[in-house]
Amino acid sequence: MIVRPVREADLPALLKLAKSTGSGLTTLPANEERLAHRVNWATKTFRGEAEAADADYLFVMEADDGDVVGICGIAAAIGMREPWYSYRVGMTISASQDLGIHKCNPTLFLANDLSGHSELCSLFLHADHRIGLNGRLLSKARFLFLAEFSELFGEKIIAEMRGVSDQDGRSPFWESLGRRFFQMEFDRADYLTGLGRKAFIAELMPRFPVYTCFLSEEARSVIGMVHPNTEPALAMLKQEGFSYQGYVDIFDGGASIEATTKSIRAVADSQVLVLAVGTPGDQAESFLIHNRQCEKARITAAPARVAAGSLIVNQQTADRLQLTPGASVRAVPLNPPKRS
């Protein structure tokens, strides 16, 4: 498997992937016109023809047989063209000395605080390929790209995690809050956001803090939580240095997590090495490896060993990277070091 920049020829495969994601992935709508526009813009981005506010680095995972089986992306600067809304979880205090009452009231504030940051987005891997190293490669490949081209991105990276919903796609947070103002199904609002039609959020959402005590108990319980299927991705990002700082999605209440770019483990620990082809040996461990290119980026995960400034890999890995011995690569162990 390799991760590479998207191409216009990938559009049919992406549309097929988008139709299989279900609700919750607003940045990959199953709309051919919207997807075609995004793919076209992504190709311009990799060519350096987009400003940071518009830059959309969209990658696909390609199997050795050429099939596209996954997708992931990085938005360089969110909220600089289209509004970016989040709820900031806060607290207000009500007190009366005469009555001896002191009440803490959890609240939700509609905010644009995350605007300008870069975002990890559009992560999806076909169910048939959720095996081995594939999921970690698809998600973490972006970190090597961030490390190599840090000047293209913000000082802080965020990731919106899918919130809690049931098997029928029902979100308790939406049912208790969003539906009261939007008067539409969750999937409809989710779809409109994916199409870039976000003006209705500012037009219809309450401008004042929402007291969570007015929400249902079920809705309150999922604020800042993630969908069970998203828990492995959340755990992986936390291992890389991401943390929850009190921001949640306005539709499903899912957590937004964040990290400074330079503090992400795979960014900070990556190093530039010389590629060598040989036998990695019994001491080999799984490495993320990037060919250090932008428009022709190729990133893979494979057994490798560092020795005297070189990264020793087998011939298949070199072929996947389309590199020959002596080429420069950026690499980092795929997994964080084990805690003692």
Image (cartoon, rainbow, N blue to C red):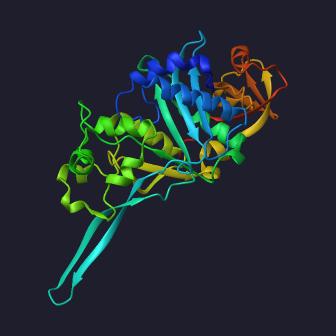
How many labels, in total? 0
Q: Percent x, y for residue 9?
A: 60, 16
Residue 112 seen in render: yes
* Identity of the residue furthest to the left in this view: 99
Residue 335 seen in render: no
- Residue at (56% x, 35% y) in the render: 73
* Identity of the residue furthest to the right in this view: 326
Considering only vertical position in the picture, is 264 above or below 299?
A: below
Q: Is residue 17 left or right of residue 252?
A: right
The N terminus - image quarter: top right
Comparing 272 with 181, the one in front is 181
Comparing 79 with 159, the one in front is 79
Q: Percent x, y for residue 182?
A: 27, 47
Q: Percent x, y for residue 157?
A: 56, 49
Comparing 256 with 325, the one in front is 256
Considering only vertical position in the picture, is 38 above or below 271?
A: above
Which image quarter: residue 49?
Answer: top right
Q: Is residue 223 left or right of residue 111?
A: left
Comparing 52 with 220, the one in front is 52
- Residue at (72% x, 26% y) in the render: 296
* Identity of the residue furthest to the bottom in this view: 98
- Residue at (32% x, 55% y) in the render: 205
Q: Percent x, y for residue 196?
A: 46, 40
